[in-house]
Amino acid sequence: MSESATCFDIAIVGAGPAGLCMAVALADTGLSVAVVDPAPDSALADPPFDGREIALTHASNRFLERLGIWALLDPAEISALRDAWVFDGNDPKPMRISHRDGGADQLGYLVPNHRIRACAFEAFRQLDAGSLFSDRRVTGVEHGPEGTGLHLDDGRVLTARLVIAADGRFSSTRRAFGIAARQRDFGRSMLVCRMALEQDHQHVAWEWFGRDQTLALLPLNGNQASVVITLPHAEIQRLERLDPAAFNQEVSARYQRRLGIMQLASQRCVYPLIGVWPDRLVGVGFAAIGDAAVGMHPVTAHGFNLGLVSIEALARRIEAASCSGADFANAHLLQAYQREHRRHSLPLYLATGAIVGLYTSTSLPGRLLRRAALRSASRLPPFRRLIAHSLTDRRADSRV
């Protein structure tokens, strides 16, 4: 390992929301932290609109408050997610999940992803939570007695006792540590954008499973909504290329004009739908968080919330070890983190895959089964309350 290497206790690869939240969570531990990201400072401070609106649970809201990030968000950009309706095909009667089922005034919150990123970066700067190596890529990993050396594309080497991968579901850092991942390509892509609505959405989110498509509507302030359309990739490409007038007409028709005419209010963004489940989350001097720990299908809106769960679980253990003078990168600590996060994420990952399989099936048995499932769930208040409580999480629990 290079004698000119710069030494840190922890190196975080990725300065997206997960990596920055991790650095902020470690700010009071007294540990030295490096954060590496290929984006320049300007893009980290003011990231562009990416179409994604993040549905945050009450637990995620509390965690972001503890990190000091929530207070930096403009209240006008935080939209209430009051209730949720789940439709099947042309059935006009959805399964309704009410905020009252969860014992709160709303099920959760909707915040633009790019604003979470910007505020996490601002909190990172305000707290002086680490040394930022922006506009830099990790080109190699070298293991040595002092820890792991990260070779950067400008020739510098950073060494760290613990490397944390926060570089997304297709994490090159995770791969560099020899950890494989299973991918599930759902064979579809997702188009997201904001649209102005003719009628009031009443802050109700929709999930709509059609015969050949899946639609979602996320209510935003100002009678706008984020629309999420899932189709085979060729169809998504066609929608993306339509001129605004034709796009407005087609999207309004796809939503059966239930909220009147819908008009494009932002750029259109497209994402492939691929789930990722790593074989492991930890290794010698290594841990994965956020999407690098599990890449979820967005249908249940758990992705970012699960990412915050992973950050809290790992940061809590690192802080306790640091306070007691123990090794914050020891195998026992990392394995305990892996067990906790796997217990939390595996049921959601498997259930999400099952839901996607059931609700995108075009076969007659599949359509009949999902309609029966929704009707049964609608008649079972305990089931609806279970879903609502998973979002509101009103327990007096300090954890995410």
Image (cartoon, rainbow, N blue to C red):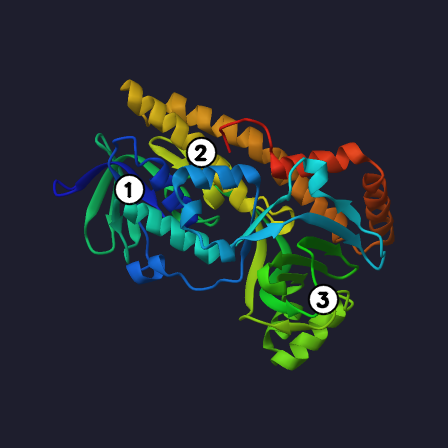
Q: For marks 2 and 3, give the one nearer the viewer.
A: 3
Q: Disc 2 residue type? A: Glu
Marks 1 and 3, how far apart at CA: 45 Å
Q: Nearer the viewer, residue 222 or 69?
A: 222
Q: Disc 1 residue type? A: Ala
Q: Earlier in the sequence, mark 1 or mark 2?
A: 1
Characterize the local packing of mark 3: few (<14), some (14-19) or many (20 or more) Cα atoms within 10 angstroms.
some
Where on the picture, by quarter, is residue 192?
A: bottom right
Give residue 109's position: percent from left, percent from top.
57, 48
Whether residue 33 sits left or right of residue 304 in the image: it is left
Characterize the local packing of mark 1: few (<14), some (14-19) or many (20 or more) Cα atoms within 10 angstroms.
many
Give residue 131's position: percent from left, percent from top.
24, 45
Which numbered disc covers residue 199?
A: 3
Q: Is residue 1 visible?
A: no
Whether tag 1 and tag 3 are in contact, CB under 8 A, the answer is no
Q: Residue at x 37, y 46 (%)?
A: 20
Whether residue 57 sits left or right of residue 388 in the image: it is left
Give residue 344's position: percent from left, percent from top.
57, 31
Give residue 324's position: percent from left, percent from top.
30, 18
Q: Which residue is mark 2?
A: 312
Where on the picture, by quarter, is residue 382?
A: top right
Which quarter of the figure is the N terminus placed in? top left
Q: Disc 3 residue type? A: Gln
Compared with 365, 250 (above or below) is below
